[in-house]
Image: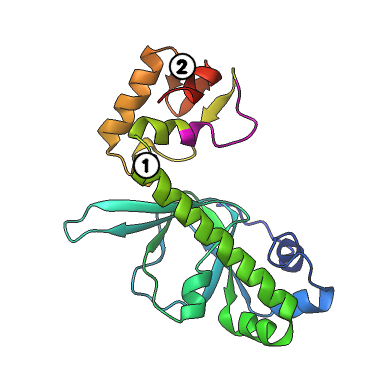
Amino acid sequence: MLKKQIDVRQFLANLPLFGAMTESELDLIATGVTELRVESGNILFKRGDLCVGFHTVIYGQVKLSVSSAQGSEKVVEIVGPSHSFGEALMFMEKPYIVTAQALEDTMLLHISKEVIFAGLERDTQFSRKMLASLSRRLHGVVADVEAISLRSGTQRVIGYLLKDDDVQNGSTVTLPVSKMVIASRLNLTPEHFSRILHDLSENKLITVNGRDIAICDFTGLQNVG
């Protein structure tokens, strides 16, 4: 695992939530930050554990998931570098409702609720930034629900492949995690996900080589109903 040291204050300053803060304010926030390194496959926290702050990812990936009584897993979100999670539950002072697992060697910052609450009481601009962050997260959840409810499985897969603005004909999309994890994230079975990739490949819209998916017909993908 990487053991690199980071400048915590500089990393916080590059996050949208803290970007407008002064050096003294960042110094104060940094007093409530703990660096965490989690090896691939290890659990960061489990559903039901107490939430006493929120996390932001420096490098690596974290899978947020829930499990049914029968043991099946539903991936709720895959969190990558410079993204955060856990803010809403921190404010609600409720236990975690998901389990967090590192998908690769991961480094995170845990920011304690005490320094966040102190910042909210001290600075109205900080309060607005926190509200904006939570609003963006809510917008993302609504978009996910809409995609799952109103789009076909094929449309969900295509939407995932074309989600980045720079994807075009000839682009190669490398799946960041296993096909099983992505299938769960898209509310598909692994078999259904593989079948959709096969059908798109048969129609010469994409080519698949392991986790590398080449976009052969960008316009054709966009026009799939």
Residue denoted by label 2: 205
Name the amino acid, label 2.
Leu
> Which residues are drawn in magenta?
159-168
Question: Where is residue 133 drawn, in percent x and y?
Answer: 61, 64
Tag 1–tag 2 contact (CB < 8 Å): no
In this rendering, position of residue 17 left or right of residue 174:
right
Question: Where is residue 26 drawn, in percent x and y?
Answer: 76, 74
Residue denoted by label 1: 150
Which residue sits at x=55%, y=37%? 163
Name the amino acid, label 1.
Leu
In this rendering, the answer to whether 144 lies above or below 88 is: above
Which residue sits at x=72%, y=68%? 18
Q: In front here: 103 or 164?
A: 164
Q: Which quadrant of the structure image shows residue 20?
A: bottom right
Mark 1: secondary structure: helix
How many residues crowd around disc 1 within 10 Å: few (fewer than 14), some, or many (20 or more)? few
Q: Is residue 161 magenta?
A: yes
Visible residue check, residue 219: yes
Question: Where is residue 187 drawn, in percent x and y?
Answer: 33, 44
In this rendering, the answer to whether 10 lies above or below 117 is: above
In this rendering, position of residue 220 left or right of residue 151:
right
Q: In front here: 155 or 18?
A: 155
Mark 2: secondary structure: loop
Which residue sits at x=43%, y=23%? 224
Question: Where is residue 168 drawn, in percent x and y?
Answer: 61, 23
Say which label, 1 or 2, has the lower sequence index. 1
In this rendering, the answer to whether 80 lies above or below 92 is: above
Visible residue check, residue 108: no
